[in-house]
Amino acid sequence: MSNPVIETEEHRALRSSVAALGKRYGREYIARTVAEGGHADALWAEAGKLGYLGVNLPEEYGGGGGGIAELSLVLEELGAAGCPLLMLVVSPAICGTVIARFGTEEQKRTWLPGLADGTRTMAFGITEPDAGSNSHRITTTARREGGGWVLNGRKVFISGVDIADATLIVGRTEDARTGRLKPCLFIVPRDAPGFGRSPIDMELAAAEKQFELTLDEVRLPADALVGDEDAGLLQLFAGLNPERIMTAAFALGMGRYALDRALDYARTRQVWKEPIGAHQAIAHPLAQAHIELELARLMTQKAAHLYDAGDDMGAGEAANMAKYAAAEAAVHAVDQAVHTLGGNGLTREYGLASMITAARVARVAPVSREMILNFVSHQSLGLPKSY
Ligand SMILES: Cc1cc2nc3c(=O)[nH]c(=O)nc-3n(C[C@H](O)[C@H](O)[C@H](O)COP(=O)(O)OP(=O)(O)OC[C@H]3O[C@@H](n4cnc5c(N)ncnc54)[C@H](O)[C@@H]3O)c2cc1C
């Protein structure tokens, strides 16, 4: 990681200052927050004050003027310290990017400074109960009425809606109800009448909760629409590629954290004449996990670089591959870490077993492993489609 071609001096400095912040909070902070049923507000606020949350947003709206390369590094380092902030994936990365690229001047002034300093948060809702991996099937519909919009529909698994000031909802206009998705994006304030939410009981030890949402005749002003209602998928993908790159960073951080715990243990735990890390059955899988994480990080850096350079198409393939590689690397690293700790891998004191569930999130969301393999089969390799 010392090669300046791959990562600049500024990047390394950012990594080490974020890592120092993460170290002050650590896994214990998240564990305590989860046990109390609270939110990671203190860490979020401090990261916001230090400029980390908005590092990718334009300087003229209070951001750091960097890109997804910088923001993904913030998330990876917090995760490696044991305290990832999932809302970084949605608030500044998806919502901030979409508003910065396609929002009106008014929307930018209203939202970006708050998203950048963390005083405001925005969730993102695309998944629906009957659509899932097939976004073309979403039925949340926007109808024009009296100069504004009326939204009806349902969403599921939407993270952080309780703490977010608003949710960026992906819908379709009424005249485009069927056929290929022509998505449009609406800012729906948390307390808009008709916007209901109920928490989903997840087996996840995370500070961020998931919600099922109902939109029942939710009336919004004309300027709730972000971007052009005809620009469709282009605008949506401006947000979805950062989401994939950020999920890769989330997975990388988690994998590194788990691997570090396993290494600490393997160096000191002794039940024969050498520490268990001397046994190759323990050492090799950990070495393999390290290699997989490093490779996944390289692809994440490539994807972020292409995205920040404005190559949306190239970034699409790389972001998918990075998300795939990082999620698989994290799942393997966490599994091996739990195994390395023997019985202690399953105790609450060591806190690793709950990460098995958390690592699986990166495998299924925001786009599943199989849908990425589909993408690569069709888009990269030119193979025919089965669905
Ligand atoms: C913790 C968590 C947080 C989330 N946060 C958000 C959020 O903030 N906002 C949001 O919009 N969504 C969110 N999601 C939703 C997430 O993006 C979806 O779960 C994901 O897109 C998969 O959709 P699904 O769960 O409906 O699975 P399904 O689409 O039902 O898929 C089920 C299984 O079938 C496989 N499958 C489906 N189609 C195919 C095919 N053609 N070929 C091969 N295999 C296939 C999938 O790979 C998967 O293994 C979150 C999910 C989780 C778990």
Image: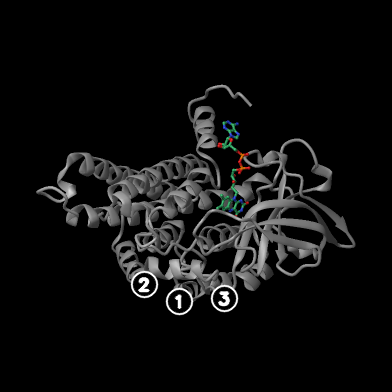
Kind of residue at disc 2? Leu
Ligand 1 within 8 angstroms of badge 2 C-beta: no
Mark 1 lies on a secondary structure that is helix
Residue at image position (56%, 69%) is 115
Quarter of the image with the N terminus is: bottom left
User: Mark 1 or mark 2: which comes first in sequence?
Assistant: 2
Kind of residue at disc 1? Glu
Near-viewer residue (338 or 314): 338
In the displayed orientation, state which residue is furthest to the right: 146
Assess whether mark 2 and mark 1 are in contact (beta carbons under 8 angstroms).
yes
Which colour assignment does the render follow? one colour
Q: CA distance from mark 2 to mark 3?
A: 18 Å
Q: Quick one: label 1, few (<14), some, or many (20+) residues within 10 Å?
A: some
Q: CA distance from mark 1 to mark 2?
A: 9 Å
Tell me the residue that label 2 is attached to. Answer: 21
Mark 3 lies on a secondary structure that is loop
Residue 239 visible:
yes
Left or right, 165 with respect to 139, comes to left
Q: Quick one: label 3, few (<14), some, or many (20+) residues within 10 Å?
A: some
Q: Where does ligand 1 appear, by image quarter?
A: top right
Ligand 1 within 8 angstroms of badge 1 C-beta: no
Q: Position of residue 12 (x, y in %)?
A: 30, 63
Tell me the residue that label 1 is attached to. Answer: 46
Tell me the residue that label 3 is attached to. Answer: 119
Ligand 1 within 8 angstroms of badge 3 C-beta: no
Q: For residue 19, what is the image quadrant?
A: bottom left
